[in-house]
Image (cartoon, coloured by chain):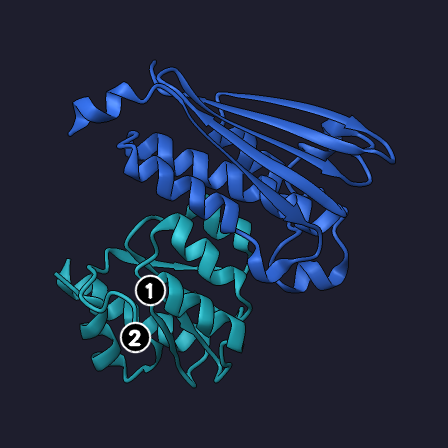
């Protein structure tokens, strides 16, 4: 069976994310996790990718109007690229600090907005690129290497 | 080995959604901050929380949580129940506070280990 899977070099997928749609939050990351499990990607890689993807997905739902979630899985890495139409991040260094959050109170009451999102993503990623323009949006590129 | 079923019986928890009731319970994590659960819980653990909205199911799926215990007599929202049924995540409730149920659960888990 694993030989069969080796023939497939690249697996890709995309989702649309809708800002404020908390009910469906986690759908894209959950699907990515299912795909990784089916592709027999190592458990640790799957776990890290799912956590980073879910935190990034939540950021779009909390802060942006809409966004796209795209993943690529190949022999070398798992890469998740999330682009949103959102407010942009004013100070990326500050946003990376654990405990810093700009989420509104009602989001915090749900148990989000604790300022752990970006730090969690960074911890689980091997590489994290952030491009942000105020008033336009943010793109996150999360890469997790499959080989050491 | 402790299973979700054993814990529900012994603590008299009320089952709202039946997931994998035979899943092994490896421990417990307690938090109402979802990113904290994402960062620090481990697969197979039960999760005790006050949160009742659908995102708890997504977190449980991503982390491989064996079951969610909602405390203080709170009830899961309808959307939460629907999502948990679709994802086969066990949700149980209790009238106990988080502190009380954690104490009871702690004794069960520590006596097994």
Instruction: Indicate the chain coloured cyan by its letter.
Output: B
Spot occupied by residue A77 in the image (x, y as percentages of width and height): 42, 20
The chain to which mark 2 is attached is B
Is residue A126 shown above or below B95?
A: above
Q: Secondary structure at mark 2?
A: helix
Disc 1 crowd, CA 10 A, few/some/many (<14, 14-19, 20+): some
| Display colour for chain A | blue
Disc 2 crowd, CA 10 A, few/some/many (<14, 14-19, 20+): few
The chain to which mark 1 is attached is B
* Left or right side of A108 for B53: left
Q: A103 and B89: which one is in front? A: B89
| Labelled disc at residue B72 | none
Spot occupied by residue A11 in the image (x, y as percentages of width and height): 41, 27
- Res B41 seen here: no
Q: Name the residue rendered at 75%, 61% in the picture.
A: A105
Q: Secondary structure at mark 1?
A: loop
* Quarter of the image with the C terminus of chain A in it: top left
Q: Which of marks 1 and 2 precedes in the sequence?
A: 1
Is residue A16 shown above or below A70?
A: below
Query: Pointer 1: what residue?
Result: B88
Spot occupied by residue A23 in the image (x, y as percentages of width and height): 58, 62
Query: Disc 2 or disc 1, which is closer to the eye?
Result: 1
- Res A5 seen here: yes
Which quadrant holds residue A87? top right
Whether label 2 touches label 1, CB < 8 Å: no
* Left or right side of A126 for A6: left
Q: A30 and B53: which one is in front? A: A30
Q: Name the residue rendered at 31%, 22% in the picture.
A: A8
Is residue A50 shown above or below A104?
A: above
Q: Name the residue rendered at 31%, 57% in the picture.
A: B45
Query: Pointer 2: what residue?
Result: B104
């Amino acid at each position: 069976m694993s030989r069969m899977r080796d023939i497939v070099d690249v697996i890709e997928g995309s989702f649309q994310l809708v800002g404020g749609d908390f009910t469906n939050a986690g759908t894209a990351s959950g699907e990515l996790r299912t795909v990784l499990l089916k592709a027999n990607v190592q458990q640790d890689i799957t776990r890290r990718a799912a956590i980073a993807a879910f935190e990034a997905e939540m950021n779009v739902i909390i802060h942006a109007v809409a966004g796209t979630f795209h993943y690529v899985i190949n022999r070398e890495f798992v890469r998740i690229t999330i682009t949103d139409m959102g407010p942009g991040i004013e100070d990326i260094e500050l946003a990376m600090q654990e405990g810093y959050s700009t989420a509104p109170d009602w989001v915090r009451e749900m148990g989000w907005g604790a300022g752990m999102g970006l730090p969690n993503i960074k911890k689980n990623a091997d590489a994290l690129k952030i491009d942000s323009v105020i008033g336009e949006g943010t793109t996150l590129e999360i890469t997790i290497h499959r080989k050491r | 080995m402790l299973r979700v079923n054993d814990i529900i019986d012994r603590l008299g928890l009320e089952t709202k959604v039946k997931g994998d009731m035979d899943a092994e319970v490896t421990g417990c994590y307690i938090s109402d901050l979802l990113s904290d659960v994402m960062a620090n819980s481990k697969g197979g653990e039960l999760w005790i929380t006050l949160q009742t909205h659908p995102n708890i199911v997504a977190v449980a799926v991503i982390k491989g949580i064996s079951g969610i215990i909602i405390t203080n007599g709170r009830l899961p929202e309808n959307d939460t129940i629907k999502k948990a049924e679709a994802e086969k995540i066990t949700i149980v409730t209790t009238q106990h506070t988080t502190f009380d149920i954690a104490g009871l659960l702690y004794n069960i888990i520590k006596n097994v280990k």
